[in-house]
Image (tube, rainbow, N blue to C red):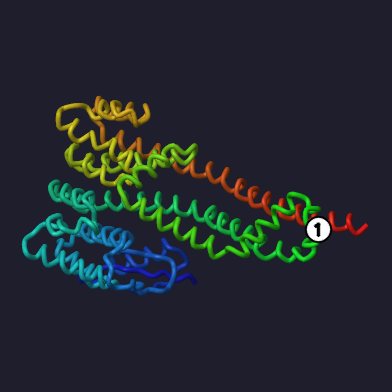
Amino acid sequence: MPQFSYKAIGRDGKSREGVIEAAGLELASRELRAQGLTLLKLDAGGSGATSKQASGRAPGRQEILSMTSELAVLLRAGLPLDRALKVLIDMAGEPAMNQLLGELLSAVKGGRSLSQALQGREQVFGTFYISMVRSGEASGQLSEVLDRLVAYLENAKANRDSVISALIYPAILLVVSVLSIVVMLGFVVPQFETLFEDMGEALPPLTSLVISSADFIKRWWWLLGLVALGLGLYLRSRLGTDAGRESLDRRLLKLPVAGGIIFEFEVSKFARTVGTLLGNGVSLLKAISIAIDTVDNRVIRDSLEVLPPAVKAGKRMSVALEETGMFTPMVVQMTRVGEESGSLDQMMLELAKVFEEHVQSGIKRGLTLLEPVLILGMGFIIAVIIIAILMGILSVNDLAV
């Protein structure tokens, strides 16, 4: 029978961890609730124990997401904030998270609010997270706001993971293609050199070119390695500067297929952040300033930087976006509709949803084009090498006859 590992809170308020056998996830959940437990997490698999991460680092995105989700459950179950943090400390298996929760608990017990306790930890939580918590405290709905925050973080993680997963296969295919060509030129072609060495200029031009390329790789492979290493270090140094990063971001936006995907991906992050913050009572000016920090592309971010002073001066957000000349009519029009209807938060979330769907479909289309191009390109180069060798062999036979 399948096993499920769980984290839960008992009637006495103490944390529980363990493994339960059940025919399915829903049956396991029912059985645990029948025992008077408030579920925090229920996963397939019987490991039961929390995996320990390497110490000496700040909690990662996944740890913050899990902590937020569990805190929302505990607060919704009626536990006060300090008691909920104490329960999370008891369940924390990673030293860095344990220490962080301990510091938050000390601050809360000292009379500070959770958002005040989070101040100074922007590198771990981000200004968006802290602003959401502050809005939840101001409205008296911290658990509900934490639920929305969890949904936002899960959505951002899903989008990020989907992009990374989609790029893994083409990256592997590209590496395999390059290695295959290097092996053909560096190890396979040289095996035929002794067969062709007496022919001199009688060799077909294509065969001579392939053999010369193989000789160059075999003799100067270390030089090619140094050149590649030097180029990598130069690019790394170049991208470490603001001018270099901005130049790269500008070039990326001009790419035929990828440029549109990058634009919509960045704008969707901005729109979702603005919409989520506005929906939780954060002022427009503050929401825009926080959302700008979520944008990675320097060119788009610089275009968005005109919004805070424009909005502060009383100008509409849609007008300021249109004046930049950077944003598509869809972005401008949906923003304008949101302003005119008084539902800017909803329109920003709708814009984010539309663009996220465009990004997903754009990635699929791009990969549909990229994969056969890589395969055909590798096949073409290898075919040229094989044809060159066969032409050389036929020339040797013609001379022998």
Q: Quadrant of residue 52?
A: bottom left
Residue 299 spot, x, y in % from top left = 33, 39
Residue 149 spot, x, y in % from top left = 27, 51
Q: Which residue appears farthest toward the right when viewing the image?
A: 401
Query: At 30% across and 36% down in the image, what residue appears?
Result: 348
| Above or below: residue 358 compared with residue 337 | below
Can you say which quadrant of the picture contains the C terminus?
A: bottom right
Query: At 35% across and 36% down in the image, what residue appears?
Result: 350
Left or right placement of residue 212 versus residue 362 in this view: right
213 or 366: nearer the eye?
213
122 or 239: nearer the eye?
239
Tell me the element at label 1: loop
Q: Quadrant of residue 385?
A: bottom right
| Above or below: residue 51 compared with residue 265 | below
| Above or below: residue 124 compared with residue 134 | below
Q: Quadrant of residue 359?
A: top left
Q: How many numbered discs, if any?
A: 1
Left or right placement of residue 188 versus residue 13 in this view: right
Identify the residue under disc 1: 199
Query: At 65% across and 48% down in the image, what residue appears?
Result: 376
Residue 144 spot, x, y in % from top left = 23, 50
Query: At 26% across and 58% down in the image, what residue appears?
Result: 68
Tell me which amino acid carries mark 1: Met
Circle 1 packing at 10 Å, graded few (<14), some (14-19), many (20+), is: some
Residue 100 spot, x, y in % from top left = 20, 66
